[in-house]
Image (cartoon, rainbow, N blue to C red):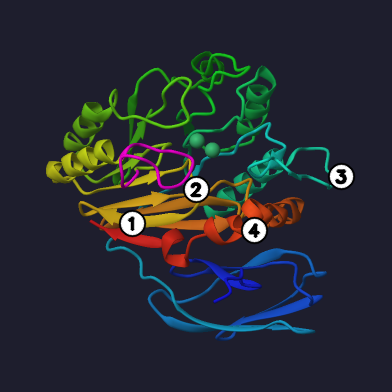
Amino acid sequence: MVLRRPLVELFAVEPDRIQVTWQSVPDAELTVQVADHKVTVATNSRPGGLILNGLTPDSSYELSIRGDRSTSFTHHFRTPGHPAGDELFRFATLNDVHLGETNFGYFKTIGDSSNHSEEPSVRCAHAAIGAFSAWGAQQLIIKGDLVHRGTKQQWSSAQQILDRVGIPTAMMLGNHEVSPSDRIDPIAAAAAMGHDLTPNVRCLDRPGIRVVLTNTTVTGSRSGRLARSHDQIIAAVADANGPCIVLLHHNLQRHRFPTFLPAGIPGPQADRLLSDLAATGTPCCISSGHTHRNRRSTRHGISLAEVGSPKDYPGVWAGYVVHEGGIRQVSYRITDPSCSEWLEQTHRAALGVWGLWSPGTVSDRCYTVNW
Ligand SMILES: [Fe+2]
Ligand SMILES: [Fe+2]
């Protein structure tokens, strides 16, 4: 069996809209049709994407793609229903922006050959901000690794980017903020931007949900630990008046030792957290970053998501829609023309395996947790 990235794919599905994305196709034009929604778009044979609105929740559809040369694609899908009750709140997350990182791949051999004046991570961050603002996010939460080496210049770049976010923003530390390189103190840098990163666990009580922000970093280490924050996370969830989402930078490993890199939180610590969270009886789910890939699993009855980076393939941000009866995640690809060609190049990392490994499936990226 030969594994290949699809030339065109259904990347994101919401109750009333979808995102379709494509690689560098041979076609100068693509016609995308779902029921009586039909759009013809000029691709100029470059990677890109579009959003189709106006679909009916909880319905089956056929997605048809026709190119003017060779691309032809048909896919059946179903839109999810809304979780029960009214929509109460929606927020966006970004993780692993890595401002200041200019190359990608294990040996950093993938560089940006475009003549843009801004580096790819900055362009992708700007594009994500535009996309989640248009989507209607009421809050942004940054789940760590905002900066790559934590230099003064990179924090300055972060400040300039966050100044453009027109909604309340909260952030957490990632390993790249606390790595022992030429960084400045991340607590002080964040404080200068108006963010207090001192507590290991912080709660944002928003309509219908308590968002629990967690510091899992260990100075000088790429991997994460829960030793400092475990009891506070459990207390924050146990004391909540309603459902919670726990946000971590590091992924919760299944095993004591990592089965892929980068290393996250060792399995025994992760299992203890999940078991204790389940024992609180409070409905909750978890979302992390760090792995730069998109995955979803359920352990101890708790939904866990890993969300990819905006600046390397496939290039995503995540949105969460809170209803009275549940929460829905959707991850959108960044398809802004200033980013698409860079993101397309980064699929070549790890001899092309990255382009197959990182995206996950539609159900890894778009799913509902009912309370
Ligand atoms: Fe990262
Ligand atoms: Fe990380």
- Disc 4 versus disc 3: nearer the observer: 4
Sooner in the amino-acid sequence: mark 4 or mark 3: 3
Disc 2 versus disc 4: distance between alpha carbons? 33 Å
Instruction: Report the side of 170 relative to 49 (left or right).
Output: left
Residue stretch in magenta = 253-266
Numbered label attached to residue 297? 1
Percent position of residue 185, x then y: 54, 14
Disc 2 versus disc 3: distance between alpha carbons? 31 Å
Task: Say which of 146 and 350 sits in front.
Answer: 350
The overriding secondary structure of the stretch rendered in magenta is loop
Task: Say which of 326 and 228 sits in front.
Answer: 228
Asked whether residue 202 is drawn in magenta, I would say no
* Secondary-structure class at tag 4: helix
Percent position of residue 294, x then y: 47, 54
At 39% from the left and 51% from the top, the residue drawn is 305
Q: Quadrant of ligand 1?
A: top right
Label 4 amino acid? Answer: Gly
